[in-house]
Image (cartoon, rainbow, N blue to C red):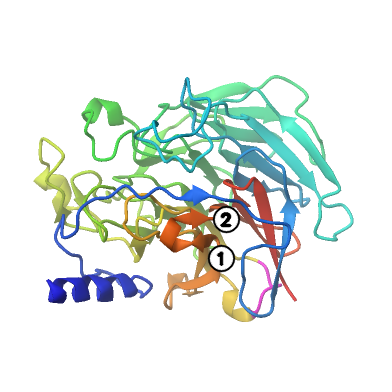
């Protein structure tokens, strides 16, 4: 038993390494646990911690579950405010089962808020509702004269002119998407290629490991590719359980994602991962994980798919709920951060010790990870013994002035990290 515990401890400490195929324990080497955090918020004089040479400040407060952000070419910051909706829930309490009780549940704001810092002092002087009446919005994108919003059940677009502060006319759903999903797999993220000819939509799975059958997973656990008008849909990559964070690596223009992997196999399984996407690639879900490691739970088995499962590029820790991703494309941070990937680890519930609850950084060289994952923004865990956290980082964006913006949905705050 002591040997097994030592092995697990060493394994846990090694998740930051650049590892093509990390050594994984057997399923159920430790029991599956439910370990929900308690959000206690931040006092006025409290905030996350960044490395020496950086300053952390509050960019925006009093939001309603800020989940994702998009920065326009003119510097406007658009914030998707939405959360998991559980009908009939008026107060979060112990009686709620099957959901992460640290989340804001019940009524979702279902809006996009515009934040504008006109004088460049790092504090928005304009905060206004840009678009409301949505259905769990998440992905945001401006392409040409269109503003795109990915609701949980469909992709909409609205006429847009740079600088406008409110959507002026009705929009149109151009792609219907499968709605709902396991825990927070309602999110639908968006990115466009550099040429603006294709849009990519990240759609998470509807279940943990296909326990409701394959029909429930049609067009899910995928990254979809479409034309800007919604036509020409195809599956760009599949077998991605919850590819919430997506972004293009700036030098190679390859699409990368962080994937929130499956639950209920024990403390150390399965590691979330960061990977470049191979067009047409299958990444294992639900039949295998991290390549050809077979998951016996899904039925029927698909050894043909397991055989071709792509091994992800880099493990980023088990049960970290890695959901945010942004490559740093500015020159305002020290040179070592240029071109690297920031990851928002929201924190998960399926590990005996709290995992995630921080923003990490992965250095890149020539379009590939070139070093160990590093902690960048920490201090979100207030008291690990009591499972208390101040907040939960999720969406990541790079502001026009080079600052890093971090959406903390649990405390309704957007943090700004700038180089001093």
Residue 199 visible in image: no
- Residue topped by disc 1: 379
Characterize the local packing of mark 1: few (<14), some (14-19) or many (20 or more) Cα atoms within 10 angstroms.
some
Residue 299 percent location from the top left of the image: 12, 36
- Element under disc 1: loop
Label 2 sits on a secondary structure element that is loop
Residue at the spot 60% in from the left edge and 73% down from the top edge: 338
Return the disc, 2 or 1, that comes first in the chain's sequence: 1
The C terminus - image quarter? bottom right
Residue 331 in magenta stretch? yes
User: For residue 379: magenta?
Assistant: no
Residue that label 2 marks = 390
Q: Is residue 176 visible?
A: yes
Report the side of 140 relative to 316 (left or right). right
- Nearest the eye: 268 or 352: 352
Mark 2 and 1 residues: CB-CB less than 8 Å, in contact?
yes
- Determine whether 14 is above or below 85 in the image: below
Q: Which region is colored magenta? A: 330-334
Q: What residue is drawn where x is 22% and y is 58%?
A: 291
């Amino acid at each position: 038993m002591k040997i097994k515990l030592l092995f697990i401890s060493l394994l846990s400490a090694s998740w930051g390494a650049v590892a093509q195929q990390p050594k994984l324990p057997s399923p159920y080497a430790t029991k599956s646990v439910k370990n929900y955090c308690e959000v206690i918020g931040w006092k006025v004089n409290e905030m996350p911690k960044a490395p020496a040479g950086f300053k952390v400040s509050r960019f925006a407060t009093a939001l309603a579950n800020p989940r994702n952000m998009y920065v326009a070419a003119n510097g406007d910051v658009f914030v998707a405010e939405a959360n998991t909706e559980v009908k009939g829930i008026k107060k979060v309490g112990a009686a709620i089962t099957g959901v992460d009780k640290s989340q804001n549940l019940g009524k979702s704001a279902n809006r996009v808020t515009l934040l504008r810092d006109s004088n460049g002092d790092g504090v928005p002087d304009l905060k206004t509702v840009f678009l409301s009446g949505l259905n769990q919005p998440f992905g945001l994108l401006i392409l040409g004269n269109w503003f795109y919003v990915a609701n949980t059940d469909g992709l909409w677009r609205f006429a847009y002119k740079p600088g406008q502060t409110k959507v002026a006319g009705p929009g149109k759903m151009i792609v219907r998407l499968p709605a709902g999903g396991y825990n927070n797999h309602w999110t639908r993220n968006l990115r466009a290629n550099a040429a603006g000819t294709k849009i990519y939509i990240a759609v998470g799975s509807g279940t943990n490991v296909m326990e409701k059958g394959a029909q429930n997973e049609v067009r899910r656990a995928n990254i979809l590719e479409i034309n800007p008008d919604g036509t020409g849909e195809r599956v760009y990559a599949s077998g991605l359980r919850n590819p919430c964070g997506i972004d293009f690596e700036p030098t190679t223009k390859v699409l990368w994602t962080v994937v929130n992997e499956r639950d209920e196999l024990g403390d150390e399984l399965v590691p979330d991962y960061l990977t470049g996407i191979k067009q047409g690639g299958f990444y294992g879900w639900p039949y295998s994980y991290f390549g050809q490691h077979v998951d016996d739970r899904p039925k029927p088995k698909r050894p043909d798919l397991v055989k071709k499962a792509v091994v992800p590029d880099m493990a980023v820790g088990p049960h970290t709920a890695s959901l945010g991703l942004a490559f740093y494309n500015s020159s305002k941070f020290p040179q070592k951060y240029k071109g690297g990937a920031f990851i928002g680890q929201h924190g998960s519930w399926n590990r005996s010790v709290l995992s995630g609850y921080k923003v990490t950084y992965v250095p890149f060289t020539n379009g590939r990870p070139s070093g160990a994952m590093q902690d960048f923004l920490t201090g979100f865990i207030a008291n690990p013994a009591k499972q208390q956290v101040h907040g939960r980082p999720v969406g990541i964006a790079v502001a026009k002035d080079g600052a890093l913006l971090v959406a903390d949905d649990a405390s309704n705050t957007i943090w700004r990290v700038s180089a001093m």
